Image (cartoon, rainbow, N blue to C red):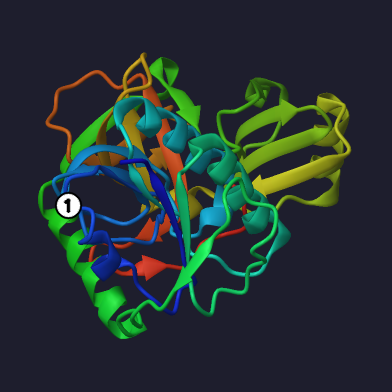
């Protein structure tokens, strides 16, 4: 039967095309798709229903293209001859390279490109064919669909208290380096860690030049990134076991840096041990509204 890679731009939809392959598993690598559940995830479908998912934490594929490739690699081990829906293409070198790697990793027998996609048809493992695809639903309809999925998720979430001392935090600058909080002599600094030449600080307020200069000297760093605790409120997150298996998705309610506790609402039923906290970049408020994403790797 063989696998097929589908590539489109954001103005068209492959929903009708996917109906032509009801017996084959579908790998959905579009994190903006909210057809099968909340957005900001990647999906493996069997018989049109979710069989596995991977938390992405954003609706923009360029936020973490390495996570898309990791999900593809894992889904390919679980699915024979899948239909793979690539992230919607827009003309950027990184997205083109991402599509190249997807194609050469999946080794599809067919590559199908929607007409109007601004993409060269040269340099693929098999020659792409082009098809006319129907227009995507208007943005207002897609936004309403995503909001409805967020509200469904919020309705089934439970509050969790997560001690930082028991967590490995992934997908964020926070928690990715060597902590030096106890070396910074300032009541404003709630958290500090250093990674190479970069100092990351979480502060309750603006830091003056003297505090910043001393902190940089202590960390032997040349650059400081400063975040504030309220920026973590409503951030998407997912729970993971020590094996890496995900078992809950939700939003961060608050991070208490002084008490070293993270409060999150997720669809996992407490009490449950959480060993990995995966953090996204998209924030969703309690009314299901998607808020503006911050700069990549700022938090």
Q: Quadrant of the N terminus?
A: top left
Counting from the top left corner in percent of width and height, residue 47 is at 13, 46
Counting from the top left corner in percent of width and height, residue 243 is at 36, 14
Question: In this orientation, does residue 261 appear?
Answer: no
- In this view, the residue in front, 185 or 94, is 94
Counting from the top left corner in percent of width and height, residue 162 is at 32, 27
Residue marked by disc 1:
22
Q: Report how many numbered discs are placed on residues in the image.
A: 1
User: Residue at coordinates 32% horizontally, 23% vertically from top-left?
Assistant: 245
Q: Image quadrant of residue 27? A: top left
- In this view, the residue in front, 229 or 293, is 293
- In this view, the residue in front, 212 or 221, is 221
User: Residue at coordinates 19% horizontally, 39% vertically from top-left?
Assistant: 159
Q: Against 21, is 77 above or below?
A: above
- Element assignment for label 1: loop
Q: Image quadrant of residue 109? A: top left
Counting from the top left corner in percent of width and height, residue 169 is at 47, 28
User: Residue at coordinates 16% horizontally, 50% vertically from top-left?
Assistant: 48
Q: Residues within 10 Å of mark 1 (few under 14, many from 20)?
A: few
Q: Is residue 49 left or right of residue 299?
A: left
User: Residue at coordinates 69% horizontally, 38% vertically from top-left?
Assistant: 200
Q: Against 184, is 121 above or below?
A: below
Q: Is residue 171 left or right of residue 147?
A: right
Question: In this orientation, does residue 90 appear?
Answer: yes
- In this view, the residue in front, 10 or 165, is 10
């Amino acid at each position: 039967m063989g696998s097929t890679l589908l590539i489109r731009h954001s103005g068209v939809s492959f929903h009708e095309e996917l109906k032509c392959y009801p017996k084959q598993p579908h790998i959905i690598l579009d994190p903006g798709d909210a057809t099968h559940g909340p957005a900001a995830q990647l999906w493996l479908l069997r018989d049109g229903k979710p069989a596995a998912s991977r938390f992405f934490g954003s609706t923009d594929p360029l936020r973490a293209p390495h996570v898309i490739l990791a999900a593809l690699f894992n889904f390919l081990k679980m699915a024979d001859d899948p239909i793979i829906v690539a992230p919607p293409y827009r003309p950027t070198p990184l997205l083109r390279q991402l599509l190249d790697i997807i194609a050469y990793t999946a080794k599809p027998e067919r590559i199908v490109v929607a007409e109007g996609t601004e993409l060269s048809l040269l340099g693929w493992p098999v020659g792409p064919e082009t098809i006319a695809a129907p227009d995507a639903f208007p943005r207002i309809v897609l936004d309403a669909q995503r909001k409805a999925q967020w509200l469904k998720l919020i309705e089934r979430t439970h509050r969790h208290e997560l001690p930082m001392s028991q967590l490995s935090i992934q997908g964020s600058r926070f928690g990715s380096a060597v902590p030096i909080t106890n070396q910074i002599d300032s009541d404003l600094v709630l958290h500090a860690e250093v990674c190479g030449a970069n100092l990351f600080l979480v502060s309750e307020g603006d830091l003056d030049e003297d505090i910043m200069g001393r902190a940089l000297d202590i960390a032997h760093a040349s650059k400081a990134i400063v975040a504030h605790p309220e920026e973590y409120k409503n951030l998407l997150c997912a729970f993971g076991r020590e094996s890496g298996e995900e078992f809950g998705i939700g939003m961060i309610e608050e991070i208490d840096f002084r008490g070293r506790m993270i409060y999150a609402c997720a669809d996992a039923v407490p009490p449950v041990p959480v060993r990995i906290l995966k953090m996204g970049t998209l924030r969703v408020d309690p009314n299901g509204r998607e808020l503006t994403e911050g700069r990549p790797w700022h938090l």
